[in-house]
Amino acid sequence: MAALKVRNSKQTPCEQCPLRGLEHFREFTAEELNFVSNFKTGELAVDAGTTILLEGSHSPHLFTVLSGWGFRYKMLDDGRRQILNYVMPGDLIGLQGTLMGEMQHSVEALSPVTLCVFEREKLGTLYRNYPSLAYDLTWIAAQEERILDENLLSIGRRSALERAAYLLAFLYQRAKATNLFKGERVSIPITQQHVADTLGLSIVHTNKTLKKLSERRLIRWADRGCDILDDEGLMQMSGWEGYSEKTRPFI
């Protein structure tokens, strides 16, 4: 894997961060904003398909997704892939490698992604001097665990149709909350292989399942990805009550 090159100049000052203008994210205090602004060392722009973090790697950086889509995954020795979760604006990646020494999963960009870059060696200062930001990191980790619980429920107990309905409703609602659609009906940039690798289904079974959702006019599949036509219908089919977080933290 080619080394990622970090641009040292701050293309987006924290004071002008577009995520701060969204109701979905909590506001920083002036002191917190000043610390985060100094904590940030630059930005990294990567293309779709780029491996941002590799399982087993030791990264000196943490990243917050500023824009774009990505996903976390693990690989088996024979090449089979399990997608664990998807990352969107406001999500923190690389914390696992900071706390455990090395990454236990990989992260890949689904679309062009812009990342805010932080030096992991400065994380101790955050924990010592900014308890509210330390709590935010704990919240982010707990939320990730909650999402993984729901994904495990899908793989373990939901039918294939319910699994697919939940996944697409979840991605749609999260993306809408973080303004990835910018008020328009934009496709979720995933392939049927991504869906199969998330749900633990064969590509043939996945194709048949997605066709059933299309026939019920809940989704429309296109070359560029998946269009969500009825997210309420998808939630009802999966038995999922929806994305409940109105305001969440980010770093």
Image (cartoon, rainbow, N blue to C red):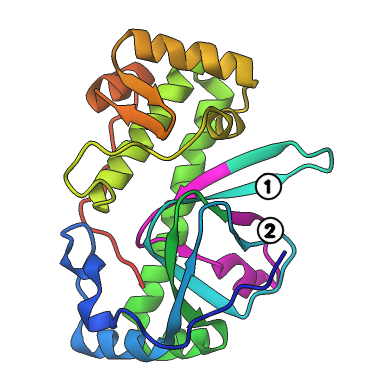
Magenta range is 84-107
CB under 8 Å between discs 1 and 2: yes
Can I make out residue 53 in this image?
Answer: yes
Residue type at numbered disc 1: Lys
Q: Position of residue 181 (x, y in %)?
A: 25, 46
Residue visible at 57% across and 54% down?
A: 108
Question: Secondary structure beneath disc 2?
Answer: loop
Left or right placement of residue 111 versus residue 243 in this view = right
Residue 200 falls within the magenta-colored stretch: no
Toward which corner of the image does residue 103 lie, by quadrant? bottom right
Identify residue for label 2: 104
Toward which corner of the image does residue 193 lie, by quadrant? top right
For marks 1 and 2, the one nearer the N-term is 1
Can I make out residue 159 in this image?
Answer: no
Question: Which residue is at the front of the view, 156 or 206?
Answer: 206
* Residue 5, placed above or below residue 71: below
Left or right placement of residue 100 versus residue 116 in this view = right
- Mark carried by residue 66: none
Question: Which residue is at the front of the view, 3 or 100?
Answer: 3
* Residue 44, placed above or below residue 89: below
Identify residue for label 1: 74
Q: Position of residue 117 (x, y in %)?
A: 47, 77
* Residue 13, placed above or below residue 68: below
Left or right placement of residue 15 versus residue 76 in this view = left
Q: Residues within 10 Å of mark 1 (few under 14, many from 20)?
A: some
Residue visible at 20% across and 50% down?
A: 182
Q: CA distance from mark 1 to mark 2?
A: 8 Å
Question: Secondary structure beneath disc 1?
Answer: strand
Left or right placement of residue 120 versus residue 170 in this view = right
